[in-house]
Amino acid sequence: MNNKYYSPLVFELSKPGRSGYSLPKNHWGEHHIGDINENLLRQSKPELPEVDELTLVRHYTNMSNNNFGVDTGFYPLGSCTMKYNPKINEEMAALPAFTSLHPSTPECLTQGALELYYNLQRALSEISGLSEFTLNPCAGAHGELTGLMVIRAYHQSRGDHKRTKIIVPNSAHGTNPASAAVCGLQIVEVGSTPQGTVDVEALKELLNDEVAGMMMTNPNTLGIFETQIPQIAQLIHECGGLMYYDGANLNPMLGVCRPGDMGFDVMHINLHKTFSTPHGGGGPGSGPVGVTAALAEFLPNPKVVKGEDGLFHITYSDSALGSVSPLFGNFSVLVRAYTYILSMGREYIPMAGKLSVLNANYIKEQLKAYYKLPIDGLCKHEFVFDGLLEEYGGGAHDADKVTTLDIAKRLLDYGYHAPTIYFPLLFHESMMIEPTETESKETIDQFIEVMRKIALEAKDDKALLHGAPHHTPIRRPDDVFAVKNAKFTF
Amino acid sequence: MKYIPHTQADIDQMLQVVGVDSLDDLYGEVPEQLKLKRELDLPSAMSEIEIRNHIEALADQNKLLTIFAGAGSYDHYTPSVIPYIMSRSEFSTSYTPYQAEISQGTLQYIFEYQTMMARLTGLDISNASMYDGATATAEAMMMCVAAAKKRNKVLIASTFAPRVLDVVATYAKYHGVELVKIPQIDGVSDKAFVDEALAQDDVAGVIVAQPNYWGIVEDFTGWADQCHEHKALFVVNAIASTLGVLRTPGEWGADIACGDAQSLGIPVGYGGPYIGYLCTTKALIRKMPGRLVGETVDAAGQRCFVLTMQAREQHIRREKATSNICTAQGYMCLHVAMYLSMMGEQGLREVCQQSYSAAHYLHDKLLETGKFEPCYSAPFFNEFTLKYTGEEGAKAFHKRMAEAGILAGVLVEGEADKIIFAVTEKRTPEEVARFLSLV
């Protein structure tokens, strides 16, 4: 990443009469768009940019230098699992036999694509301990919505129409309640204990015959394993509900303890977190959904099954919840995740989980003398600090205190991405750190060193931190002005 | 293992700092009965050479056909610059641009994308992408209901692709929306039905497809006025590339434009990733789902870009958010911004013109074979529907063509002899001649 800002937009490079395209001559004779009734044609010009190829290539190349990515540096970004994105994944996903395959091609001629889909379903099933998967959802939130639809379809199939409440811990990510709302469910929040886990006694009070299920992630958003999960699952099942596992935090559990074995009935997996596919600045991701055998019939159409003839078939069933994607979702993301699973194999998939936990605990132990650790003890792949300790400028009642935002911005100056900040909502100065297993001890040691240095800076020179970042392509943007300005197009 | 940098010495030192004896001890609190006491039943780790052989063997079992089909996946040309720039990992390996200071690249191309999509659709603003055209339409439906407050009925054209209708109907079912299909007459939506339904004053929105599933360019004159008179929103789902020449949703008076932008040179890719788009008017901005990039200034006063209007979104508003969507297809915005920049108005018009001419040429020649009859008389763009009248039947014809390396349109489910063909600028005279010779 450059620290010099490349600022033009392509519209500012445009000049009438330039062009960046190359097309063959029109061979097709007399038919002309002008034959269509003028009322059906565009009345105004689209005012698209006009640029030559080199101008375009330089523009986007220079623009890319404004950006930070996993290939540039370390992302201690909690709940996002910013692991390395292997390069062979990209090459396999770019094979023309996948990229040029039209989805309406008869299935007998797409057997390779279907087999890959099938194999990935089977691998995810083994990894998660759930029987059947759909790979059609395009993102984690899309998977959540699909999983909740499975839960509703299940209750409705039994004529149990009053189950419209879903229990969500107050530490949950905002997508959980938002997905539930899109799915027509009412959200009931359950509180946390001082140790950061679900308050089981409070949960008991919420149980009745209107409960469709409960959404959890385990470890939770504080990075703490919910040890009471067998009891929670039993309580929910006894009251007739189903257990939903948000796969955002699956990485530390790989090969150690599977959601299916914890008592979950439905889950989604973020392939762009646990299975190394690139985040792409906000997608395309992929959010496969797994269910127990009893719920398999409700998974969305289309489905891929292996027939007795050994061939792979695309099927549609009436018992399915419906469709959430016209086809197979973000297929090329599936190719990447499959490649990753083959690269890691049964030997290294569990190592990914364990080393992500080691990295997180190693950071936590060495920084807790500087940053407020609200919940002590072993964490899993991530943990949360509640800002700086008072002696390092983090005093809660100090009007001039150094905030989590200041620390996050100062990290940018040192060439790191910021942690996830102000989430979970349980603390005022949350700073959620997740290192992932692909970071070396050296990288982690350097990060710890920088975090200590920032704490010392905060103690001595608060203004330096309040004004951070100082060395990035731009300085702190004015978010309030962005809303007031309301300028969303050039 | 090349993705795991830890040496045994590293692990030992780190365990010591943490204060546990082994990696397994890091899971000391996990109840024993929950732990997996065996190895995962997965293949052993493979080398790159083995992976390449395995996946290339799978790829070899796919047969690439010469594409004369669309139905939501259009085989337009992808200029080589696009995959070249898209492989820059500064873009691809970055996270959602919440840290604007180190994410201006992502924010700039999304801002460019938003601008181009707003101009293409003739509406004020565009969000920073949806998953695909089908879910974008479902989100538009939910937006209609949210904007109308006390109405939950939405009318949708039955001239959508069945796969898209399935997705919208699924969202409607679980979100509690009463979705009513508008009947069609000769392949176009029945306006009299819509007028009558609107007169009940309980409709939140009307959603139409342009060009529709059959390839027909429909005339929506008067639809928007009629909707607005009855306080319903008018939504046009348009195939993005056709907006280079066809009347825009904005020009039809639409409140929301949505659909798939796959047709802007995104590979057919066995169905994805594509990119859904959603554009709307300034008046509806607070009801809009998805991320939005806005222009602002930084502390030094220079122009820059940030994610904004986040009070609509799930991470702030939780269950009161306009949608649950967060990660969508952000990276595909870069594809679209580059495609539209390279093509410009002239290039996009030329793509449309060539696709149009080639489709009409094929249409006429297929009719000349005597094995097809027209189904509809309305104007079409680069996709059209014919009835196969040859002795073998449409299904056998389609299969025979596939065996000869040609994807001869899409068979219409439930309507035995109907086939929908599409042609793009990529098809050569030789390919078309070969297809015709085999018919």
Image (cartoon, rainbow, N blue to C red):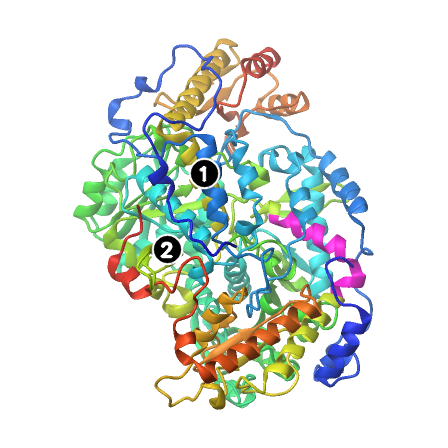
Is residue A336 in the magenta section?
A: yes
**Where residue A448 appears, x then y in whole percent?**
61, 75
Mark 1 or mark 2, earlier in chain? 2
The segment highlighted magenta reads: A333-350
Q: From what the image shows, is residue B88 above or below residue A354?
A: above
- Quarter the C terminus of chain A occupies: top left
Tell me the chief SS of the magenta region. Answer: helix
- Protein chain holding label 2: B
Q: From what the image shows, is residue A452 above or below residue B213?
A: below
Residue at 25% from the left image edge and 52% from the top image edge:
B282
In the rendered image, residues at marks 1 and 2 fall on the same chain: yes
**Where residue A178 appears, x then y in whole percent?**
43, 66
Q: Which amino acid does label 1 sit on?
A: Met
Is residue B333 in the magenta section?
A: no
Could you tell whether A464 is left or right of B195 in the image? Answer: right
How far apart in space, not on screen, are marks 1 and 2 (Cα)? 19 Å
Residue occupied by mark 1 = B338
Q: Quadrant of residue B277?
A: top left
Q: Is residue B413 visible?
A: no
Badge number at residue B292: 2
**Where residue B327 appears, x then y in whole percent?**
49, 57
Q: Tag 1: Cα neighbours inside 10 Å, few (<14), some, or many (≥20)? A: many
Q: Which of A440 and B302 is in front in this view?
A: B302
Q: What residue type is labelled 2?
A: Leu
- Protein chain holding label 1: B
**Where residue A335 appears, x then y in whole percent?**
66, 47
User: Helix, strand, or loop for circle 2?
Assistant: loop
Could you tell whether A184 is left or right of A321 in the image? Answer: left
Q: Which of A231 and A29 is in front in this view?
A: A29
